[in-house]
Amino acid sequence: MSNPLEGSILRKSCSGTQLNEMAPPAPLNTTTPSESKPEVVKNTPTVKSDDDDDRAISSVKQNTRAFLSSTGLDMGAGMSYLASFTILAITTTVFGLASLFLETYVLNANAAIVVFVVGSYVVWSSYHSFHFYLMKCSKSYASIDDQPKQFYVLSNLIKSAVLLSYSPLAAVLLYETMVHDTWDSNRIRIMGTLYCIPDFVSLFMVSRMATTTMVHHIVVCVFNAFSLYNDYDQINVIRAIMVYAVWSTFAYMVNLLLASRFVDTSPTMSMVLSALALIIYGLCCLFNWSWQVWFLSGLFQEKPFQVIGYVALMGMLVWDDIVLMKWLFKNVVKKAKGMADDAAENAQKASQPDQPLGKRMDGKEE
């Protein structure tokens, strides 16, 4: 007798126990051994039993619990180099050309709001565009079956490429302000807006974000709002915001490293990225904080309340930087220890002589 629940929507929506209770009882076997007939083998299609469905459901539940309780994604199922660097290449090219266009035609115009709206839409659409095509064309990306993790990877890859494309303009702006003491308000507003865009968009696109990182992004948006209405010809604490943003632009390697945790990278490549990110980020913070202390200490006597308010907000950025540098340092130590242990294990295996043929492990002849 066929099971009326087989293949129905009710079967798919109920648990194995519920289905067993709802299924009709199996007929009793009233045939005696003497009355048994020889079994005739028929070529009938194989039908899955309830036990098979129960085992499949149990297996899915166990795999789901194991995945949700794990600390991270299995690196063997991470993104490939090709998918990662395709995103970096496309994003860097697009925003590099956009930066060149802004340098030539827009940076001298009072259009910061327009740049923010258009830039936010471009970054937002890039999440969905990369996600759509990578799901179709990249098995390594599709293997990351948790969409929040996929968007976390995209967020860091996009931000890394965006900051890299901004770096030449940021370096020029830093040189003009530090060396020539030229503070072009419109150019600084546009650059501050460009820096704010990826942080602003990621607040809505990345659901799993550390609290310190979320606070960092919010403070960046608040600082950019002050920057849009500031006259940089006047000496005030808003100048310090611009300098902080420029030095943070040069630390794009950190975002690349954060994304590489879900990329199928070799131990050597992971170690190199970790070391470079720590060195670059540490130097950027050192130069940045040194200038901030020098500038704010000279401004404190003239505008103490501005300095106190700025330091209170900047402290949140500094705390996030410190947390990130601690993680970078621990990650470098962990990677170095892992490589040293692997090297020692390989050396130990190489020092052991191979067993000759025809002899057992105890040395006796076979």
Image (cartoon, rainbow, N blue to C red):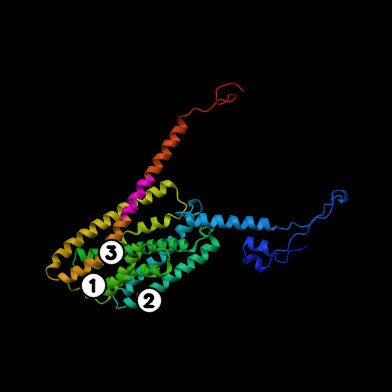
Crowding at dot 1, Cα within 10 Å, few <14 / some 14-19 / many 20+, comes out as some
Mark closer to the observer (1, 2) = 2
> Along the line of sight, which residue is nearer the eye, 265 or 105?
265
Mark closer to the observer (2, 3) = 3
Quarter of image, res 346: top left
> Along the line of sight, which residue is nearer the eye, 227 or 184?
227
For residue 337, above or below residue 358: below
- The residue at 21%/73% (across/down) is 232
Q: Which residues are magenta?
A: 325-335
Could you say which disc has been placed on residue 316 in the image?
3
Taking the image as shown, residue 359 lies to the left or right of residue 190, namely right
**Amino acid carrying mark 3 in the image:** Met
Residue at numbered disc 2? 117
Q: CA distance from mark 1 to mark 3?
A: 27 Å
Crowding at dot 2, Cα within 10 Å, few <14 / some 14-19 / many 20+, comes out as few
Q: CA distance from mark 2 to mark 3?
A: 26 Å
**Amino acid carrying mark 1 in the image:** Asp
The furthest residue to the top: 365
- The residue at 63%/55% (across/down) is 55
For residue 12, above or below residue 359: below
- The residue at 41%/36% (across/down) is 344
Mark toward the start of the polypeptide (1 vs 3):
1
For residue 103, above or below residue 286: below
**Quadrant for the N terminus in the image:** bottom right
